[in-house]
Structure formats: C-alpha cells, structure tokens
Image: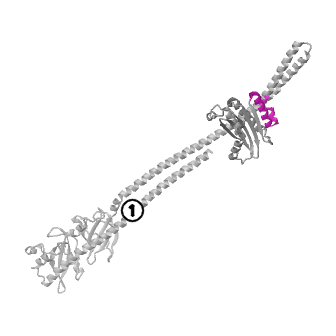
Amino acid sequence: MQNRSTQQWDKRSLTVLALSVLLVLIFSLGCLLIYHKLRDERQVEDRAEAQRMLLAFEAHSTRLFDYADGQLRAIRVYLQEHDNNTEKLDSFVHKIKASHTEIFTGIVTVLDRDGLFVYHSETSRDKLKTLGKMPDLDHYQYFITHPGDSLFVGATRRGRVTGKMQYRLARPIFKNGIFDGAVVLSLLPEYITDFYRSTSLGPHSFTSMITQEQWLIARQPEVSPKMYGNRIAKLLRPERGHGSSVFGFISPFDQIQRDVFAKNLADYPVILTVGIAEQDRYNTLAGVRRNLILLAVVFSLFSMFVCFLILRLLNQHRQLAISETVSRQSLSELHRLSDHIQTIREDERKRIAQDIHDDLGQNLLVLKMDATALYSGTEGTNPNLNQRASLMLNNINATIQSVKLIMNNLRPATLELGLLAAVEWQLKQFTRSSGIDCKLMTSEETELDFDKNKSLALFRIFQEALNNVIRHAQATKVKVKLHRDEHGFSMTIKDNGKGIESNDREKPNSFGLIGIKERAHALGAEFAIESTGNGTALSIFIAMKKNSTLEIIRPTIRSLTPDATTL
C-alpha cells in the first residue's frame, strides 16, 4: 500500500512539473508571438512611411529636374536662335538662373561637337581656352547610343574647375538636324540630400538617387567622395511604371541589410530609392523585447515558485499519507494485540476459575464434610468440641461462598444462562456492595442470544462501567437499559453522578475507558459517552446488518440514553 501511495504521489508530482513547464512554454510562446506581431506591425508602418517618403522624394526630385531641364532647354533655344553665339550668353544665363535660385544654382557649360569648352558660367572667356577639352565625355557616349533629343543624367564626380562633387544634366545641340554639341548643367548633390536631412526611418535608413546605369548621384546619409565612383551593381532595376519595387539589398557602402523601395522617376532616367534597415526596427523594439523577456522570466520564476510550493505540499501530503498508513497499520496491530491480550486474560481467568473449582473447591468440600462429621459426632458428648466444630463449619461455608464469588468474578457462571441473567446477577452484587440504587430496563421481547465471546465482552464492558461509577461518579442511582430491534443491540448505563470532564477523558491513565473502547472495537461496536453536570451515559451499539451506518447508529444511541432527571 505504501508503494502504491508513493507511486500515486510521484505521478502527481510529475504531472505538476509537466503542467508548470507547459505553462511556461505557452506563456513564452505567447510573448514571442506578441513580439513577432509587433515587429510585423512595425514593418508595415515602416513600409508605409517609406512609401510616403518615396512619393515626397519623387515630387521634390521631379520639381528639381523640371527646373534644371527647363534651364537646359532655354539655353539651347537661345543658342539656336543666336547661331551658337555665346558672347551674350552670360546675361541670359544669369537671368534664367535668378528665377531658380530658390531651388538650386548650377554651373552651365556649353561644349561643341568635339567636346571643347565653348562656354563656362564660372570661367572668364580669356581662361576658357585653357580648359581645352572636357575630360569625361560620358554624355557624348549616351547621345550616340540614344539618338534624338534626350536628357542625360550623369554620376556625381569631382568638378575640374570647382573641385566640388557634382553631377551633370545634359541636352544635345542640333544644327540642321545634326549633333553639334551639348549644353551641360552641373549641380551639387546637396540640393537633393538636404531636403531629407530631417526625415529618417532610423539611423541606418537612407535615401538615394542613382542613374539608370546604377551610378550614384546623391545619398543621405552622405558617403565619402571616393564611393561615388563605384557602380551599385547589386541593385535591381525597378519595373517601369508608377509603382515601386521592394527587395532586399546589402549596401556596398556599409554592408547593412535593408529593405529597399525603388522607383523610376517619371520622364527622367534616374532611380529613387529608400532603404529601411532591419537593425533599426530591431533597435526600436528593443524596449518591448526587453520587457517581454523580463515578463517571461518573472512569470517563469513565479511558476517555478508556485510549482515548488505545490510539490512541497504534495510531498507533505505524501509523507502524511505514508505516516497515516503506518499509523493505521500500527493501530491495527495494537488492536489485534489488545484482542489477543483480552483473549489470553479471559482464558487465564477461566483456567484460574477452573483450577479453583477443581482443587480448592474440592478440598473445601472435603474439609466441610469432615467438619460436619466432627460436629455430628461431638453433639451431646463434648459440648466444647462441638461448639468449636460449629464455628469451623461456619468458617468453611463462608470460605466456600467467597471462593464461589471469586470464581464468578473470574468467570461468571451465570453467563451460561445468557447475557441478561449475568447482567441481573451483577446488578444485584453491585447494589449489595455499593448501596447504589440500580434499575434494569429491557424491551418486552429482548433476546440476547449472543455467542459466548461476544456475551463475555459485553459483560466485561458492563462490569467496567459499574466500576467507573463506584470510583469516579459519586452517584446514587444507576439505570441500565438493554434493547434489541431490527437495527441491532444497544446497552446504555446511565448514572446521576458529577459527570466526566473533557480533560479526564484524555488522561493517559484512563485505563477503564481505554479498556471499554478496545473491547467495543473488538466487537465491531459503536461506543459513545455523553456527560453533563447531571451524570454520565455510556452507550454501546452492535449493528446486526452489514449495511448499518453510523448515521443510524448514533441516533439510536442517543434515543437509548436515559435522561438524568428520570433517575
């Protein structure tokens, strides 16, 4: 039984541990799902913000290129109308630049069909010949591969005259339908990047403009001048149209992974890009992530603490169950030992009574016969001896009566006639020895046909109850009631004494009550004792049916308990 209980509690402990671990995992998974949901929501918000920035970037860049291209077209028309005469071009250039200064100011250059400088807005006419030929004529290569009137947008490079980083916009000049040179407008990339200095999706996000050939025009945050000479070869081209393309991209400038939104600028050969770094999104959610981790850790510690308490309670319950099982086994063994002692005691009493009857009784009988003969033989012949023989005969008769009383106390002979006869005999002896008024009540048809062992045990309980009345109750009346019906047999002994205090019942030397309880347990009987200031009632009930319950037994005992006022 102990092993089964231990296994049962072990299963409960494992169940608690499993549930605790499962609860922690579910909670941690919930925190992880919350974090992923917040990250996805933030990603959607970032992408929406990137789309808005891309639209603003497109509007600003379109406006810039519209003004720049308008200036190129105006200069080209002026040159065509004045037969490529650049003598009065300065005044015209300053005039049209004045209307665009709120957006940008650029350097105007006019080249002939061979790439020689014809006009430079920042160089005097005397020094113009010293410039010679423009060193980088990539716009000429563009016009050769793109015949017709088209706008060229070149990469950002360091200017030969100004020494600043600048990019070029160029329009071809035609004479009689034949390519005759180019008008070039050099602009600083700051005109593009300054617009976005206060707009950012994070410290690692960027905005940039590149040519269709993947050369860098402008970028915010800015990069070192030497980075402008590198083609961004890994950047995919967005599809033509008004929509934007989104793709992952590792920047060659800082090697950071980003989601890049790219869009072709309508009517102009450039690509606009906005990049969002996953690292920025990760850093933005760092506080949320830290709080969720802290919450998960606190919940895990709390769950472990609760689990520890539950396991400790389960262990205590397990120990209590084991202790209770051991106690029940010990109590069962004590009951068996008590029953065995009672059996041995009764057997010993029976043996002693039998020995007294066989030896002492026979000897007293022989002695009585001799004394009777002596008494008869001396009658009339020896008065003194006859008187002494009479006294001796009386003493022998008194001794025989004492021996019979001792034998009855050891093994009442009246039990052979039944429990009722033994109780009646014991009450008479009790009344004679104590002087206490006793009354016996039985039902009209009370049949007490118990077996010898059960009758003996009930009789011993009855004797012990009367002994307690003499020793402790200070009573003047005792009422005994025997009753038997279809429920079972009950015996009640009620006195009108001082009663029993609650502390008296718990005294370790209350052997009388202990003996009664042990005998009642051996009988399988229900024992009850009720005590007030008006006396004490001791009740024993033996159920005659196996299905009798304590709910039936206890009311029966109370109903059989006589009221103290009736004594």
**In which quadrant will I find the C terminus?**
top right
Q: Residue at x 30, y 71 (%)?
A: 54
Report the number of numbered marks. Answer: 1
**Residue 55 sits above or below residue 416 on the image:** below
Residue 7 horizontal/vertical position (percent): 59, 48
Q: Residue at x 19, y 86 (%)?
A: 177
> Residue 140: which quarter of the image?
bottom left
Which element is circle 1 on?
helix
Queried whether the magenta region covers residue 119, the answer comes back as no
Q: Which residue is mark 1?
A: 38
The answer to whether one can see residue 204 in this image is yes
Task: Give, as a three-letter code, the residue at label 1.
Answer: Leu
Magenta stretch, residue numbers: 407-435
Q: Say left or right for 303 vs 2.
A: left
Q: Residue at x 25, y 75 (%)?
A: 62
Q: Say left or right for 31 vs 83.
A: right
Query: Which residue is nearer to you in this view: 154 or 480?
Result: 480
Q: Say left or right for 409 vs 225.
A: right
Queried whether the magenta region covers residue 423, the answer comes back as yes
**In this view, which residue lies farthest toward the front?**
565
